[in-house]
Amino acid sequence: MSRFAEPQHTAFRGLNDSIGFDWRLGPYDVEQSRAHAAMLASRGIISGEDRQALHDALAQVEQELGEGSFPFAPSDEDIHMAIERRVTEIAGPVGGKLHTARSRNDQVATDMAMFVRAHADQTSQAIAALARTLVEVAEAHLDWPMPGYTHLQRAQPVYLSHHLLAYVWMLIRDRQRFAAVSAATAKLPLGAGALAGVNFDTDRRQVADALGFSGVAENSVDAVSNRDFVLDYLASAATCATHLSRLGAEVVLWSSEEFGFCEVSDAWASGSSIMPQKKNPDAAELLRAKAPRIAAHLVALHGVMHGLPLSYNKDMQEDKEHLFDATDTLDLCLAAAQGMLATITFRRERLAAASSDEFLAATDIADLLVRRGMPFRESHGVVAGLVRTAIEQGMTLSELTREELAGHSELLDDEYYAVLSDGAWLESKISEGGTSLQRVRQQLERAREALSAR
Ligand code: ARG
């Protein structure tokens, strides 16, 4: 019997069915059903014989899903109903007992929590792999000077290793965020029923233990309403993708003819269909472009969830495609970034030439005056005057004469020329976290430590 006198409209089916995407929850749904059936039996809600029949059928379903032979039916609205239907086909009427003391509302929340936890861990490992590659690349280019930029104007030179390690720290923070995502999935929703709890004396702790949850959700209404962990995954993914987009953008710039700092390997580049001379850093460009897509998934799910009355609403079915696309996109970007960086070539001469621009030492000259007692704000002005004089005369800073220096400040002597000689202004950045070699070595050590944890 059905409450409904009419079949569902095909357009309604198209809108309402989620099987086209939630099939990805299949393995989690089987696992939770197995734990649920075991709990029902251990509480005497179903018999041991029933449990065995359900477990046998679930084992077959698992195999069919795994090898792609699961017979989906046109009537399957979502993965939960598809699996229950198939279990009943295999096991007979006992299959109908699987849904005892369970609703699709707590079921789907549980599948989603399991999916998010598994993917947060997987993403975190991919982040660690990329970070380790960056540490290796940094180590291989430990003392290669390059210009550091602000406003994309040459600012102060740094070592390439130092610049690359900046990304490693972003990725280390990303991993911390994904660890928090995983922690946000710790409480088991299953057992909340549709929203109010169920009419059986179930053992939710047993199910939690079997499925790797550390506890049970305390409030059944919250349990079926909660998608915070999906928002958390998307927020962390958006931040991580934004980091990758900055890395991609720099590789695009740096591999241009104008910069000439690096070249991506052929495996990570494409040619032009019309201009035979071209080698385009497409992978880096796409890293740059994927970030807003992931951020959009986050914004979209905030839109779905905001203002929703408690508890479950069908709106929440929209969490899936946003999450699935975000996990797929981020994992692909992480793998591509890792592969591209592992095989990139840097050009030492181009980096060195760009960083030997003496104007990059302007701050160091100002600091020389500070060491001689001049307030920094004043020395900043003196050096600005020197830079202006040099530019007006088409000279470099070290080409200015002693007389010209004296015209700007009587505190300037031969040490001025020493500060400007052979990269002294790189090794002078001795403060903790600075670019001097000793500090970069220390940083490498710390990054390795941070990455070896877990
Ligand atoms: N396919 C649904 C979803 O993903 C499953 C839950 C359906 N619950 C319901 N009361 N209709 O949200």
Image: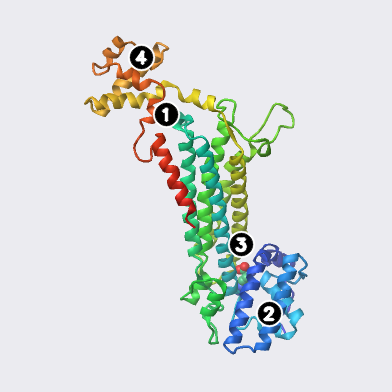
Q: Is 133 left or right of 362, judged from the image as shown? A: right
Instruction: Tell me which label, 2 or 3, sits earlier in the chain.
Output: 2
Determine the residue positioned at 54% across, 71% down: 212
Query: In the displayed structure, does residue 153 sit left or right of residue 252?
Result: left
> Looking at mark 3, is its residue's CB closer than 8 Å to ligand 1?
yes
Query: Mark 3 sits on what residue?
Result: 320
Confirm if mark 2 falls within 8 A of ligand 1. Answer: no
Contact check, label 2 and label 1, Cβ < 8 Å: no
- On the image, the x and y values in percent for residue 11 come to 72, 64
Mark earlier in primary sequence (1, 3): 1
- Other-residue count near label 1 (Cα within 10 Å), few / some / many at <14 / 14–19 / ≥20: some
Which residue is painted at 58% across and 82% down in the image? Answer: 39
Q: Nearer the viewer, residue 210 or 193?
A: 210
Which residue matches tag 1?
155
Q: CA distance from mark 4 to mark 1?
A: 19 Å
Mark 4 and 3 residues: CB-CB less than 8 Å, in contact?
no
Q: On the image, numbered disc 4 is attached to which residue?
A: 389
The span from disc 1 to disc 3 (Cα, nearest Å) is 45 Å
Tell which circle, 4 or 3, labels the residue nearer the N-terminal end.
Answer: 3
| Residue 322 rendering spot, x and y as whole percentages | 60, 57
The residue wearing badge 2 is 55
